[in-house]
Image (tube, rainbow, N blue to C red):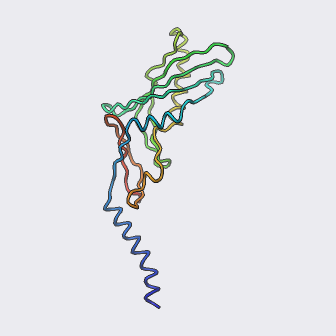
Amino acid sequence: MDLKRYAKIAAPLLLAGLVAACASLIGPREVVLPQERLQASLDRKFPMHQRALGVFEVELSHPRLAVMPENDRVALTVDLGVTPLLARQSWHGSMLVSGRMRVDSVNNAIYIADAHVDRFIVDNMDEGKQAQLASVANLLSDKLIRDVPLHTFRPEELRYAGVQFVLTSIDTRPGGLVAKLQPAQ
C-alpha cells in the first residue's frame, strides 16, 4: 500500500523533472517566416476603413511588404483612397511606411515599431494639398502600425516536442524574417 502511494506522488514529480530536462536540452529555436507567408497574412487583414481627423473617410488596401535585411527593417506600401465627408470628390494614392520589428510576447505577435512615413503620394493633387494631408498620413501610419501585426503565432506554432516556447526577438533576412524562440520558464 505504501508503495502505491509513493508511486502516485513520485510519478508526477519524475514526469515534471523529465519535461524540465527535455526543455533544457531542446534550447532556443529559430522559425523562418518567408515573405510570402507574411504577405498572405497581411492580405487577409485588408482593406481597412478608418475615419481620420473626423473629416476624412480613408480606405487602405493592397498591402505590399518588403523586407530590408541590409538595415534590419521592413517596409509596407498600401494603396489609399481618401474621401472628405463634406465633399463629393475623392483622392487615390499610396503610402509607404517603414520601421523596425517589435515583438509582443504577450500576444505572440510581430509589429512594425518606430514607423516613419517614407512616401505619401495622392494622384492628381498639388504638393500644397498633399502637405496638408501629411498629418492624415501620420495618423494612418500610427493606426496601421499599432493595430496590424505582421504575423501572429498560433499557440501550436510555439510548442515543439512537448515544450512551450516564447517569442523573444525577430531578425530580417533576405526573403523573410527569423523569429527567435526560447523555452518558457
Quadrant position of residue 163? bottom left
The answer to which of 142 and 4 lies nearer the viewer is: 4
Residue 92, horizontal then vertical, whole percent:
55, 17
The answer to which of 128 and 155 lies nearer the viewer is: 155
The answer to which of 151 and 116 lies nearer the viewer is: 151
Location of residue 152 with respect to 89 vertically, above or below: below
Location of residue 91 with respect to 36 vertically, above or below: above
Q: Using residue 84 as the reference point, say whether residue 129 is left or right of it.
A: left
Residue 103, horizontal then vertical, whole percent:
43, 43
Location of residue 19 with respect to 7 vertically, above or below: above
Residue 38, horizontal then vertical, whole percent:
43, 37
Q: Using residue 26 as the reference point, say whether residue 117 is left or right of it.
A: right
Q: Using residue 184 as the reference point, say whether residue 81 is left or right of it.
A: right
Q: Point out the residue furthest to the bottom here.
A: 1
Q: Quadrant of the C terminus?
A: bottom left
Q: How many marks are shown on the rendered structure?
A: 0
Which residue is found at the position 63% from the left and 13% from the top?
A: 89
Location of residue 89 with respect to 32 vertically, above or below: above
Residue 118, horizontal then vertical, whole percent:
43, 22
Q: Using residue 151 as the reference point, say whether residue 80 is left or right of it.
A: right
Which residue is found at the position 42% from the left and 30% from the top?
A: 65
